[in-house]
Image (cartoon, helix red, strand yellow):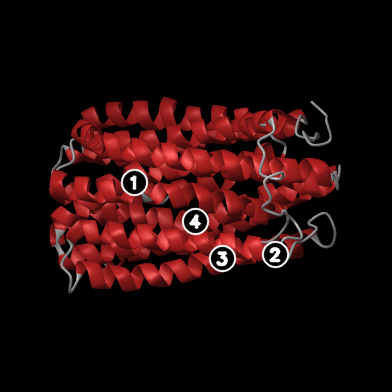
Amino acid sequence: MQHTDLTQGSVSRQLLRYALPVVATQLLQAVYSLVDMLIVSHMIGPAGVSGVSNASQTIHVLTMIAIGLSNGGNIMVGQYYGSRDEKNRIETTGSFFTLFAMLGVVFAAGSFLLARPFLVFLRAPAFGEALAYLRIGAFGLLFVFGYNALAAVMRAVGNSRVPMVCILVSSLLNIALDLLFVGPLRMGTAGAAAATVISQAVSFLLALIYLLRADRIFRFTPENMRMHADKIRQILKVGIPCAIQMSVAGLSWLAVTYLINDYGIVWSAANGFSSKIKDFLLQFIHAVVTASSSMIAQNLGAREYDRAEQTLRTGMTMTLLMAALFIVLVEIFAGPLMRIFTAEPDVIAAGALNLRIEIVSQLFYAVFLMYHSLMLGAGDSWWVLLSSFANCILFRLIFSFIFESLWGVTGVFIACAAAPIVSIPIGVYYKRSGRWRKSLAAGQT
């Protein structure tokens, strides 16, 4: 298996070389939902878009839990790899894979069984379309958990290219199946969900086949796949706060969706479109953060503290430049971006308003998410949870309800744009505290 020692060489070149495939992977994953939304919009209309938007937001929350938990495996494997501790790295990898196989089954079954009551609670305007999408999409969580475990281990040892290839193939397949199922076969939102699930299965199988054939880093033997209690505790110690953090973030966005749904299908559809555009742009920043956390983990495992700090500075420069570019582009082209998805004038106007207000938050995300990469690299995921709770609950959620009562739906957008500011001073304090100068893998607590 290809792997890269991120503790050596130029920080900027290593981070850029490692981050570019991660950027491509994150963007290709975002294409799943973008393609669903685009094709459903043109072939079904606003009701279909509203249904996909509400159901995919729900699946997105559960996917964020999988990604959050996978951070535990990624960081621990990365730290053991950086410290050259082969025995603990292999035991952690096997425990991680087995744990995620079990969680995938539990989450898929639970999502299918609870789909109807959850959408009733969310007050989804296009209920039938949303239910069809969510029930089928639930099966994809089996492959979401599986793929994220495999990809996390590959990234932990510096291999960011294979996950990119897996997602590239599955994204192209998703587009083809979307066009077939929603178009000629007229399967509606159920077809869009089926296309996504099949594509997710393919990305998982490709990653699994690669790891089965390239066994230099891990061999899938019964002995290696045993669950070690101490390794599970380490993974969950890092992963659970990350999963809670991402759940809190996702649930706060569901609360925002709940508020916007009251304004009808036009605003619900506009929110669906604008959310996909914002999420797509934010993937650039998330990719640099993901790459930085893996690189920081390896360097802290090797006790290269200055190099870990330099990785933070380099990554933040990159994310700030990206955020500034996105803000300028969206402020100028908000209307044309919305017209990619729909020709409905009311939906275009509503979505453009949402975009122009909330895009400013990209600047704040660029800063505080990079501090999160330092926290994650050190295994201090409880600090990530604290930061997320502050901006998602104390600001986004509470102020969305307050501002909505004052200024209507525009107030919700303002609250969402301002919320990330509160996480920046938390990140600054954590960095200055110096507590990140440790490694869980090296036994420093």
Label 4 crowd (10 A; few <14 / some 14-19 / many >=20): many
Residue 311's place in the image compared with 257, above or below, is below
Residue 359, image x and y in percent?
A: 40, 51
Dot 3 or dot 2: first in sequence order is 3
Q: CA distance from mark 1 to mark 4?
A: 23 Å
**Label 1 sits on residue:** 138
Q: CA distance from mark 4 to mark 3?
A: 14 Å
Q: Is residue 339 left or right of residue 438?
A: left
Q: CA distance from mark 1 to mark 3?
A: 23 Å
Q: Residue at x 27, y 60 (%)?
A: 192
Q: CA distance from mark 2 to mark 1?
A: 30 Å
Q: CA distance from mark 2 to mark 4?
A: 29 Å
**Label 3 sits on residue:** 164
Dot 2 and dot 4 residues touching (CB under 8 Å): no
Dot 1 and dot 3 residues touching (CB under 8 Å): no
- Residue 79 visible in the shown view: no
Splitting the image into 4 quarters, where does residue 223 fall? Answer: top right
Indicate the amino acid at tag 2: Ala
Q: Which one is closest to the eye, mark 2 or mark 4?
A: 2
**Label 4 sits on residue:** 283
- 127, 101: nearer the viewer: 101
Splitting the image into 4 quarters, where does residue 180 fall? Answer: bottom left
Q: Secondary structure at mark 3?
A: helix
Dot 1 or dot 4: first in sequence order is 1
Indicate the amino acid at tag 1: Ala
- Residue 311 visible in the shown view: yes
Q: CA distance from mark 3 to mark 2?
A: 17 Å
Dot 2 or dot 1: first in sequence order is 1
Q: Is residue 171 left or right of residue 49?
A: right
Q: What is the number of the mark on residue 214?
A: 2
Q: Secondary structure at mark 4?
A: helix
